Image: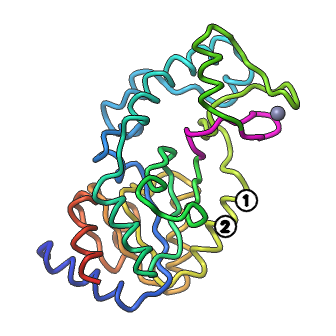
Amino acid sequence: MLSLEQQLQDAAELMQRAKRIVALTGAGISTESGIPDFRSPGSIWLQQPPVSFHDFISKPEARQRYWQSRRNLSAQVTAAQPNAAHLALAELERKQLLQAIITQNFDGLHHDAGNNAERIIELHGTSRAAACTLCGKRSSIKELQQRIDAGEIDPGCPDCGGFLKSATILFGQRVPEAELTRARELAAECDLFLVVGSSLKVTPAATLPRIALKNNVPLIIINLQPTPLDDYADVVIHEKAGVVLPPLVASL
Ligand SMILES: [Zn+2]
């Protein structure tokens, strides 16, 4: 087993040769900001199964449950601040080494950390906007939440009458095609693929590092738990992102 110091050195050597790093981030980077990982043991979503997209659009009681659970979650997400790992990725962009961040998170913390919004691809949407489930048009989540809090049930889209909800992807809802296409292009064009805090178990995000591997691009994985791609990665560090990324980026 390599020491953390040795692993950091190996990762730094690979990153020093790269100019177009693409990072894929998952729940693991935001747990250090106090946002629960919905898929980990003990998760609130395992105690009460999440509302699926099908249920949301077909059952009024599912929509009520959705807004109820969102009330608890949004308090946690709103209070969250970017942690050392988010800030290190912003620093990587300032060093002109980071092409883009593809994220499975919807908490907006990469934006708060200072990364350019045009370089952030949110595969699972964002909790900072509302979206129509039918036409996809985005609107203010604050106004929508106020309508819900004021007792309105099932607020509809002014354009098409579809149901409104937060602009995040529910279970059973597909990742938007534009985001997915761009993520695949970035994975194909990068010269180093960096996984941070993703277990690489949820598709389509999990397929992205495989695209990079096909092009013989170095793969670095920083995640507390083992992932299915550990054996294929050039460097694997099973440690918190907030411990690993700051010294790594500072050494570049
Ligand atoms: Zn609509």
> As shown in the figure, which amino acid type bears the numbered disc 1?
Ala
* 32 vs 176, nearest the viewer: 32
- Neighbor class of circle 1 (other Cα within 10 Å; few <14, some 14-19, many 20+) is few
Image position of 47 with respect to 5: above or below: above
Please give the name of the residue rendered at 72% of the width and 27% of the height, measured from the top-left corner: 164
Q: Is residue 157 left or right of residue 210?
A: right
The image quadrant that residue 211 belongs to is bottom right
Give the label on residue 178, or none.
Answer: 1
Q: How many marks?
A: 2
- Element marked by disc 1: helix
Position of residue 119 relative to residue 110, above or below, is below
Q: Nearer the viewer, residue 115 or 85?
A: 115
Quickly name the residue at label 2.
Answer: 182
Residues rendered magenta in the picture:
125-138
Query: Residue sitting at 33 percent across and 66 percent down?
Result: 88
**Quarter of the image with the N terminus in it:** bottom left
| Numbered badge on residue 82 | none
Mark 2 vs ligand 1: CB under 8 Å?
no
Front residue of 207 and 124: 124
Work out which residue is located at the far bottom of the displayed protein and give it.
17
> In 3D space, how far apart are the residues under numbered discs 1 and 2 (Cα atoms)?
6 Å
Q: Is residue 245 above or below residue 160?
A: below
Q: Secondary structure at mark 2?
A: helix
Q: Is residue 155 magenta?
A: no
Q: Which quarter of the frame holds ligand 1?
A: top right
In magenta stretch: residue 128: yes
Position of residue 249 measured from the top left corner of the image (x, y, whole percent): 30, 75
Q: Residue at x 36, y 56 (%)?
A: 197
Q: Above or below — where is 196 with respect to 202?
A: below
On the image, the x and y values in percent for residue 73 come to 44, 28
Q: Are marks 1 and 2 in contact (CB under 8 Å)?
A: yes
